[in-house]
Amino acid sequence: MSDNNPVVNLEEVPPTFNAASYFVDRHLQEGRAEKIAFIDDEGAHSYGDLAAQVNRAANMLRALGLRQEARIALVMLDTFEFPTLFWGAIKAGIIPMCINTLLTADHYRYILGSGRPQALLVSEPLLNNFLPIINELPTLENVVVVGKDGHGHALLKELLATAADSFTAAATSRDDVAFWLSSSGSTGNPKGVKHRQSSPYWAAKLYGSNLLGVGEGDVVFSAAKLFFAYGIGNANFFPLLVGATSVLMAERPTPRAIMNILHKHNPSIFFGVPTLYAALLADKNSAPQNGSNRLRQCVSAGEALPEEVGTSWKQRFGVDILDGVGSTEMLHIFLSNSPDDVRYGTSGKMVPGYDGKLVGTDGQVVATGELGELMVRGPSASDGYWNERAKTISTFVGAWTYTGDKYTQDNQGYYHYCGRSDDMFKSGGNWVSPFEVESALVAHDAVLEAAVVPQQDEHGNLKPKAFVVLQQEVEMSDGLEAELKEFVKNSIEVWKYPRWIEFAETLPKTATGKIQRFKLRQTADLKG
């Protein structure tokens, strides 16, 4: 963040600041008590309802014996109870740990054992993952179930029913840790990422309000879930900053489920990930008449958006997808295309209020057009990793944060994504960007998804290998393999084409939709 950047005045957030007071209570003061804040599978909930339930949640947590700076684990589906408990905890000065709902009992044992929460608040459909490990967690004093049957544990609805609906916010500072998120786990075990009370304000203002233009009249829908950075910004921080409405969906984001929500609630802004946009385009039911009639903007993050997906979506739906880059460490998107400047095939430019630079292995800024690792800084940056000092030091360098992604920047300032630093490899002395080869493959009509990793040839040299998921009605064949190789040769530099193609039914992904190439390397016993 440049010292003279007029977009950011850190004093906008006062020294004493409680994010829940700002994002929830402020709307009552500004006359939005009757306005709809959230719509979930059970119905609509006003800002007045939200404020009352947040206060009940804060009182309930205090009644459980939790005090300021204690931690609780939220492992919850996208229902109205999620923002209720998230903001209720923050209002009480208690730190919610937002945890992926798609993990195994072993993962939860690791995360809860490391993070040491005193309470677990879990959606009933997810409870079975915790039953084998609850007694192994000595700091866990309370388990509260969100649902109809607590299976021997307390029920949230019963605890809230007896809690008062008024609460005085804890006197927290703008720099106090307010909540944790988990890193996506694209390279291994997720890390606890600590965010400050002021972080949601800056992420929502700089990207959601200033760049994307989310306003009070918008209805937003995020297929990306609330438990991770992209989703919690889209569906929680952005609408609540300006008094808009957010649609939540508890079920898995399949193309059919997404189109049903788009058609039923007519959101004006939709947030997805590249693999979901590709799946929607491949689904025959995904047509404008089956979606939202007021859709004005779409956003993509999580991985870079292939140019073919963006142009095909615009052609079918008449709405651009803004491809953006964010991270759990920076809370949300800091590099993006913008509504008046969409250039498919690029990641756009730095969001005003953030600074970025590309550095080489020596830590020095690279020349225009040269490959470098992206570093970013801005006011929504994390306070670091929990209990991971070495990784915190290596990732956060002063005010700058390493993203782990390689880019080039052209003469006009647009960033071009090349791949994660640990996914890039050299072939014949030249860098290979897996994303570039994957984008060439998905431009073929037969290909739905692709992932590229290095593999040694008979001489021990690294060459690209592709894992390809075909469109639903396409059959794999030796002829198709040869056709795809030739197609890539005619699209990008010949030496980058995949020497081997393995057809697969699915690709391993994180819950955020990121392809886990490290698993493909392990499966194939590759040496990248």
Image (cartoon, helix red, strand yellow):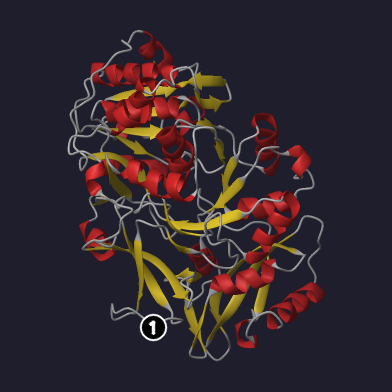
**Camera-nearest residue between 17 and 87:** 17
- Report crowding for label 1: few under 14, some 14 to 19, many 20 or more residues within 10 A (C-alpha): some
Q: Position of residue 299 (x, y in %)?
A: 56, 50
Counting labels gives 1
Q: Position of residue 418 (x, y in %)?
A: 50, 72
Query: Could one spot residue 283 in this view of the protein?
Result: yes
- Residue 464 in which image quadrant: bottom right
- The residue tagged 1 is 367
Query: Could one spot residue 104 in this view of the protein?
Result: no
| Amino acid bearing label 1 | Ala
**Camera-nearest residue between 75 and 265:** 265
**Camera-nearest residue between 504 and 340:** 340
Residue visible at 36% across and 44% down in the picture: 181
Quarter the N terminus occupies: bottom left
**Camera-nearest residue between 169 and 516:** 169
Q: Position of residue 38 (x, y in %)?
A: 51, 27
Residue visible at 77% across and 45% down in the picture: 287
Relative to 29, residue 216 above or below: below
Side (left or right) of 242 relative to 91: right
Task: Please tell me whether mark 1 sits on a helix, a strand or a loop.
Answer: loop
Relative to 232, residue 393 above or below: below
Relative to 292, residue 351 above or below: below
Q: Position of residue 308 (x, y in %)?
A: 68, 64
Residue farthest top in this picture: 162
Side (left or right) of 157 relative to 452: left
